[in-house]
């Protein structure tokens, strides 16, 4: 099986959570803040992707189209 090229959003969020929850002092407060911001952005992307697609616009009724003049040919 071919190796995956990119991480999933869930894998990225897990990695960012590890940075944000670090207690060893390896990451600065600025790193933790950046991880929190990126995690929030990824969560918004997930929510947007989970939203159902908007329904297609209804077609123009045939009765209304019958009242239009024929197209002009130049």
Image: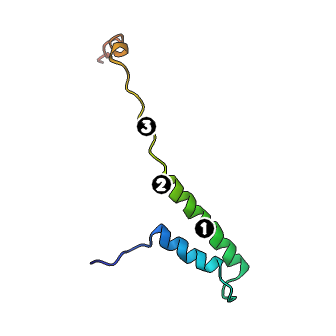
Is 55 drawn above or below residue 6 in the view shown?
A: above
Residue 64's disc is none
Q: Can you give x and y, in whole percent of width and height, for residue 26 in the image?
A: 66, 88
Q: CA distance from mark 2 to mark 1?
A: 17 Å
Q: Earlier in the sequence, mark 2 or mark 1?
A: 1
Find disc 3 in the rendering and name its residue: 55
Across and down, in percent, residue 3 comes to: 33, 78
Mark 2, other Cα within 10 Å: few <14 / some 14–19 / many ≥20: few
Residue 31, image x, y percentages: 67, 78
- Residue 4, by quadrant, is bottom left
Locate the C terminus by quadrant.
Answer: top left
Q: Is residue 69 left or right of residue 30?
A: left
- Residue 62 position, x and y percent, is 32, 17
Seen in the picture, residue 50 relative to 71 is either above or below; the reply is below
The residue that appears at 64% across and 67% down in the rendered structure is 37
Q: Residue furthest left?
A: 1
- Which of these two is toward me, 15 or 34? 15
Q: Disc 3 to disc 2, how far (Cα)?
A: 15 Å
Toward which corner of the image does residue 57 lie, by quadrant? Answer: top left
Q: Earlier in the sequence, mark 3 or mark 2?
A: 2
Sequence-first disc among 1 and 3: 1
Mark 2 and 1 residues: CB-CB less than 8 Å, in contact?
no
The local secondary structure at tag 1 comes to: helix
In whole angstroms, how far apart are the C-alphas of marks 1 and 3?
31 Å
Residue position marked by numbered label 2 in the rendering:
49
Q: Residues within 10 Å of mark 3 (few under 14, many from 20)?
A: few
* Residue matched to label 1: 38
Q: Quadrant of residue 6?
A: bottom left
Q: Nearer the viewer, residue 21 or 70?
A: 21
Q: Nearer the viewer, mark 2 or mark 1?
A: 2
Residue 6 horizontal side relative to residue 47, left or right: left
């Amino acid at each position: 099986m071919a190796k995956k090229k990119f991480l999933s959003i869930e894998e990225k969020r897990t990695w960012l959570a590890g940075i944000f929850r670090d207690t060893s002092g390896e990451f600065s407060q600025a790193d933790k803040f950046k991880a929190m911001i990126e995690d929030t952005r990824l969560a918004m992307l997930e929510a947007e992707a989970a939203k159902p697609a908007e329904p297609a616009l209804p077609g123009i009724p045939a009765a209304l189209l019958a009242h239009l003049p024929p197209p002009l040919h130049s």
